[in-house]
Image: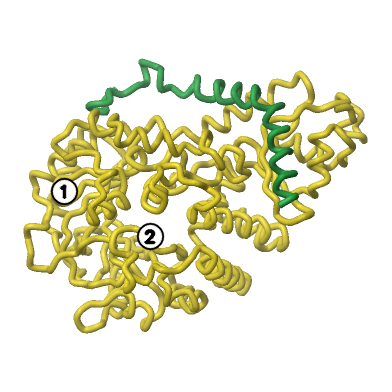
Chain colours: A yellow, B green
Amino acid sequence: MSRLLFDSARTEPESWDLLPLRFHSLDAERVVVSNMVGEHLVLPRRELDEVVSGGAPSLETLASMRARHMIRVPGETLPVELLAMKLRTQKRRLADMTSLHMFVVTLRCEHTCRYCQVSRQATGRGEFDMTEETAEAALQHVFASPSPQLKIEFQGGESLLNFALIRWVVARAEELNRVEQRDLAFVIATNLALVDDEMLDFCGEHGIVLSTSLDGPEELHNHNRRRPGQDSWQRAVAGIERVRDRLGPDYVSALMTTTEKSLEHPEAIIDAYADLGLTGIFLRPISPYGFAMRLRGGGRYDTQRWLEFYRRGFAHIIELNRSGVPITEIYAAIVAKKMYSNDDPGYVDLTSPAGIGIGGIVYNYDGGVYASDEGRMLAETGDETFRLGTVNDSWRDLISSNKLLNPLWESFTLSSPGCDQCAFESWCGSDPTFHHATMGDFAGHKAFSAFCARNMGIFTHLVESAEADPFVRELLWEWGHR
Amino acid sequence: MRQEVTDQTLRVRIAERTDPIRNLVFALAFSRSGLTDADGARDVETGRP
């Protein structure tokens, strides 16, 4: 390949070498090209052909690709050093190991949500509560993890039904942390239906954040999330306002789940969040695990219908922002951080190696230890593939077991067929639980993978939207740098 | 279909020419991870340095 890299300056050598790059066709005329660490560029297809074949691409193309370490001047070593440094930075959390520790403090719940993935139990059945003895053993694992950041997330069932254990775990973890001196944080996942001021005061004293479920407007939410009195929405909204009034706005966030009934209402769902003053919404598909796939679970829709829902929702969020209402689509913000920065957002569902076990780990009420919450859901229907052992096993045995290492190894995107040459590999992640559940294989066949189709659909939509509209590009850039 | 075949052919050409550098970047990146540094490593059982 011989050609001046910068015609005007005339100071550059006259040829270039290719560096590792990957591309994806946006349409017949354009491709998105990415380097080893996910820095990207949209080019006319013919320009990429010219660069690869050593033809006559434009100087602008050459300059842009050189700036993104897609090509280099022969003999240059700095681009290789920079790529290595950026890659090492992206993967830096690997050495820290598990930071998210999920405690399923009870299976009891007073809701009967259509899409509930676990076998919830009636509220009076105390045998489905985690005991202090189990929690103590789990806490030893929490602090055996070398991660300097430790987050303990309490889950259910409805976690507040076993608030006494939450109090005990928080106190015990803080006691252990006086010696350990880690960056310790707590989250309670709750429907907020049972929250009271005493609980909130405890949360305030210990910096415990509450994460709740809000599926959108009243009718939709109460259709999905049933409880005696059909007042789930009213209680969730009242709970959100109560937390904000007593503790402040940063103490509560909400998550939605997309059921089939949700698909026609992305704008109304987003407006429900905006009306409550919530500044972020995570447009999430239903997880195809456990009991969610029953007919009444509302999870029987295909990826293309969900992507249409996502695109409509994303467009509405853009218009809200354009009109001065600041609201973030959280998944797009996670991806934007990968698109526009070299920072790792630390989101366990978009990492490779997968986040199972080494990003987050689950301690079930009965002492079972699972590589992921989805793995626990699978176990509820008889598939114990992701059950690593029990809290009585050693941390070493749990983390180094083949039950964890095999899915991590087999699903690693940098060597997984269909992923290693994908332009979006750096933005994406591996999900061995999903592919095991849907395809019976940890890596999965990407041509038929709903996980792949969903993420490719989102990535291409974000790239195209940013290309088409400077406002979107600036907004994504801003989300990516928070 | 023709476009897909063309794309795959181009991917193979790129990979053939860049695989050695790709492997070099990986080697450079992860040889300095700190995972093999006894001073910085933590005990896998206790999590303590």
The residue at the point 58 percent across, 27 percent down is: A84
For mark 2, what is the residue? A287
Asked where in the image residue A126 lies, by quadrant, the reply is bottom left
For the residues marked 2 and 1, what is the alpha-carbon distance in whole angstroms? 29 Å
Same-subunit check for callouts 2 and 1: yes
- Is residue A34 rendered to the left or right of residue A443? right
Q: Position of residue A53 (x, y in %)?
A: 82, 34
Q: Position of residue A217 (x, y in %)?
A: 40, 80
Circle 1: element type: helix
Q: Which mark is residue A328?
A: none
Crowd class of label 2 (few under 14; some 14 to 19; many from 20; radius 10 Å): some
Tell me the kind of residue under disc 1: Val
The residue at the point 69 percent across, 24 percent down is: A78
Chain identifier of the residue bearing label 1 in the image:
A
Tell me the kind of residue under disc 2: Ser
Q: Where the N terminus of chain A falls, by quadrant? A: top right
Q: Earlier in the sequence, mark 2 or mark 1?
A: 1
Circle 2: element type: loop
Q: Name, please, the residue furthest toward the front.
A: B1
The residue at the point 40 percent across, 51 percent down is: A434
- Is residue A379 rendered to the left or right of residue B4? left
> How many numbered marks have been drawn onto this rendered protein structure?
2
- Is residue A194 rendered to the left or right of residue A117? left
Q: Nearer the viewer, residue A318 or A398?
A: A398
For the residues bearing labels 2 and 1, Cβ distance under 8 angstroms: no
Q: Is residue A89 above or below residue A109?
A: above
Chain identifier of the residue bearing label 2 in the image:
A
Q: Nearer the viewer, residue A158 or A172?
A: A158
The answer to whether residue A216 is visible is: yes
Q: Position of residue A464 (x, y in %)?
A: 68, 58
For mark 1, what is the residue? A169
The answer to whether residue A199 is visible is: no
